[in-house]
Amino acid sequence: MIYILLRNRRNIALLFILIIGTNIYWLLDERTKYPSSPVVTIPDIEYDIATEDQSKQNGTIIAGNESEHTSADVDQVHDGRNQTNDISPAGEISDKIDEIVKSTILKDLDSTKHNKTAAEIKKRDQHEDYDILLADITPPKISTVKLNATDNSLHPVYVNGCCGIGHRLSRVTPGLVYANRHGREARVWWGDVPWSALFNNTDFIKTTRRNKGWKAAGEQGLRFSDSIPNDWSSLERKKYDDTGTVFDMFHQRNDRFFDDPAIAAMQVSMRDSLTPLVLSYLSPIRAQLHKGAKDKSGHMSVCTHVRQGNNETGDWERKSWRHFDFEAVLNGINAVIRNLVESRNATTTSIYVASDSETVRQWFDANVPNNWGVIQPKKIMPKPKNGVWFGEQGSSTGAALNQTMKNEAMAEAIAEIFALGECDVLIIPNYSSFSYISISLMTARKNPVFFREDGGVQFREMSTFDGFEKKHDS
């Protein structure tokens, strides 16, 4: 029959049109089923938002899924290179994404403009990556105690923490130390952002899911869900006199955190296992810190964390002690830095600011001398209109993010926490669990940490506190 058709040129033309038409119909049908994924651009990165079918094909679990799994005890390690394999359906955020990242969505996705923009971003990123590669981005050396070897025949200790990253780490870290004290591996499960997106597996800590091992740990008293083991530390509890500063709240809520050397040892192990995703935020900050020290012999770096609240409601709004005179406190921090510059004869100063408020870094930009440099992160996640992406338990703020963006937001927070512990001086104006790790790292390096006096704008250095004189020399 085909031979008969091909004998007539007209029939050949009709056959050709039929074939082309069939293919066009098939393509249109497929585009209806699987529309092209929009590209959401967070500064310096691009990601495709995959469909739910793609997520299922990749074998990923949606954040917050707490069902038990029969798979291997340890989840596969995702080091941050393949974040699009771990994302939620695009439909979950389609009604909110425009509000969150309105200025970052490329409007003309199918045009040559988009291709040109993507090429420019790639070229810029390659240039910045090259600059970072040439810079010194090694973390500071810290002498710590040696962690214990782990026994694989022992059931691991399972730990979990909720809410913001500071609260999670202040709960999880003592649990990690507890596990190591007893020669056991620790397994960490977080339902929204997997531990493996932030930290690579080590001999001491591995990522996990809520599986049979999680259940068995609970039955054996080896599971600590948003709690701290009573005997996590080998040190006896000590009573310290109140200092009249915000330090008292840190110490009262988590005593021995700054006393036990195993805490710093575990934190260094965690720091050295950060994934490429976290380092993509941290390395540019380190490069700027170290560049200043390398270029100028009289250089001094100062870090500060200012938790303002960002119009947060709920727990933050209810607790009056969280609120302070924003402008007065920033002026107080500025005064401390000026005094340090004079006392140390510093010729240049680099300031790294971490905050839930976008206005804090802008304030320092506008209010410091010309020979001071305010470090500018190369990657910045958009902030929510109110509060923080990961806040009090039950908060739905982070629900506006798909899994890729949740990983990004948490990676940025982890990078900020470790960056705060790598300056010459750390200034803490108010209590926030976000600062626990950085304070601990600074004290392990015997670098000064200043805490604001209660209800005022004056600051005291930690080595002046009773019981900390020898440990934390300035």
Image (tube, helix red, strand yellow):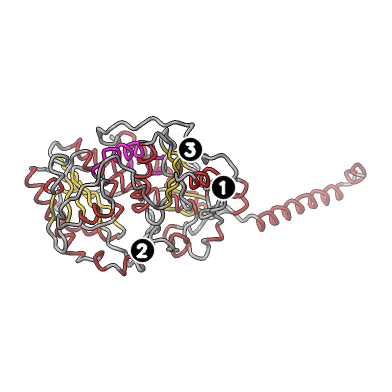
Q: Residue at label 1?
A: 60
Q: Residue 63, how many percent across, how many down?
A: 51, 53
**Mark sitting earlier along the chain (2/1):** 1
Q: Residue at label 2?
A: 387
Q: Amino acid at mark 2?
A: Gly
Q: Is 282 a magenta residue?
A: yes
**Mark sitting earlier along the chain (2/3):** 3
**Mark sitting earlier along the chain (3/1):** 1
Q: Is 345 a magenta residue?
A: no
Q: For the point 6% across and 45% down, which residue is it?
A: 343
Query: Regarding mark 2 in the picture, which secondary structure is present there?
Result: loop
**Front-lying residue, 61 or 46:** 61
Q: Amino acid at mark 1?
A: Thr
Query: Regarding mark 1 in the picture, which secondary structure is present there?
Result: loop
Q: Nearer the viewer, mark 3 or mark 1?
A: 3
Q: Residue 370, how many percent across, how many down?
A: 15, 51
Task: Name the disc covering residue 155, or none.
Answer: 3
Q: Amino acid at mark 3?
A: His
Residues rendered magenta in the picture = 259-283
Q: Give the crowd class for mark 3: few <14, some 14-19, many >=20 residues within 10 Å.
A: some
Q: Residue 142, how many percent across, how many down?
A: 25, 34
Q: For the point 17% across and 53% down, which residue is it?
A: 451
